[in-house]
Image: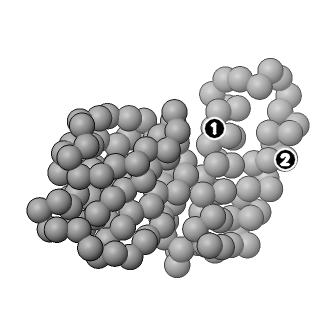
C-alpha cells in the first residue's frame, strides 16, 4: 500500500452529484486519445474522456467503474473526473444494457448516410457506454 502522502484525491462527479470521493494509489481513465494512467506526482493535465472503464486502486484493492464521456483534470495529488454517466457493477442490469447495445449497433449498421455527423457520433457513444457497463458487470 502506498504511503498516505503519496495518494491521489480522486473525485468523480456527474450531473446527479459526486459518485466517488476517495484517496487512490493510481487511476486509469479512458481518454479520447487512449488510456491514461495516473500516479501521484503526475504533471498537470486536462483531457476529454470517452465512454469506457475507469480503474483505480484504493488500499491495495482494484476497483472498476463505467464512465461516460466527460473530462478529467489531473494534478500532482488529485484526479477530478466530470462525466455524463457513471455506473458500478451493482447498478448494471445486464439484459437491459445488452438490449441497448444491440439497438445502437443495429442503428449504426443501418445508418442511412455517410458515417459522420452528430447523430452518428451519438450512436457510437451509446454503443461505447453500453460496452463499458457490460465490461464491469461481467468481469
Of the residues under marks 1 and 2, which one precedes in the sequence?
2
Q: Is residue 59 visible?
A: yes
Observer-nearest residue: 9 or 118? 9
The front one of 136 and 40 is 40
Say which residue appears at 73% left-offset and 72% top-offset.
95
Residue placed at 88% from the left, 37% from the top?
Answer: 110
Q: How are the colours assigned in the image?
A: one colour
Q: Where in the figure is residue 76, as x and y percent of width and height?
A: 19, 45
- Helix, strand or loop under label 2: helix
The numbered disc on residue 106 is 2
Q: Residue placed at 54% from the left, 74% from the top?
A: 89
- 10 sits to left or right of 14: left
Give the secondary structure at mark 1.
helix
Residue 23 rendering spot, x and y as whole percentages: 23, 66
What is the quadrant of the N terminus in the image? bottom left
Left/right placement of residue 103 relative to residue 73 reads right
The answer to whether mark 1 and mark 2 are in CB contact below 8 A is no
Q: Residue 125 in the image: x percent, y percent? A: 62, 43
Q: Which mark is residue 114?
A: none
- Which residue, given by chain and number where applicable, does mark 1 sit on? 122
Residue at 14%, 68% in the rendered image: 4
Q: Nearer the viewer, residue 61 or 139?
A: 61
- How far is mark 1 from mark 2, CA to CA? 14 Å
Amino acid at each position: 500500500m502506498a504511503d498516505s502522502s503519496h495518494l491521489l484525491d480522486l473525485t468523480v462527479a456527474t450531473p446527479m452529484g459526486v459518485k466517488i470521493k476517495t484517496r487512490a494509489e493510481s487511476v486509469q481513465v479512458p481518454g479520447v486519445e487512449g488510456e491514461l494512467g495516473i500516479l501521484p506526482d503526475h504533471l498537470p493535465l486536462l483531457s476529454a474522456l470517452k465512454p469506457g472503464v475507469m480503474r483505480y486502486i484504493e488500499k491495495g484493492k482494484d476497483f472498476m467503474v463505467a464512465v461516460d464521456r466527460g473530462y478529467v483534470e489531473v494534478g500532482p495529488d488529485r484526479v477530478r473526473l466530470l462525466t455524463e454517466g457513471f455506473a458500478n457493477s451493482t447498478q448494471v442490469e445486464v439484459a437491459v444494457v445488452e438490449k441497448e447495445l444491440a439497438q445502437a449497433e443495429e442503428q449504426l449498421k443501418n445508418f442511412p448516410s455517410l458515417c459522420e455527423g452528430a447523430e452518428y457520433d451519438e450512436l457510437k457513444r451509446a454503443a461505447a457506454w453500453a460496452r463499458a457497463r457490460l465490461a464491469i458487470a461481467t468481469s
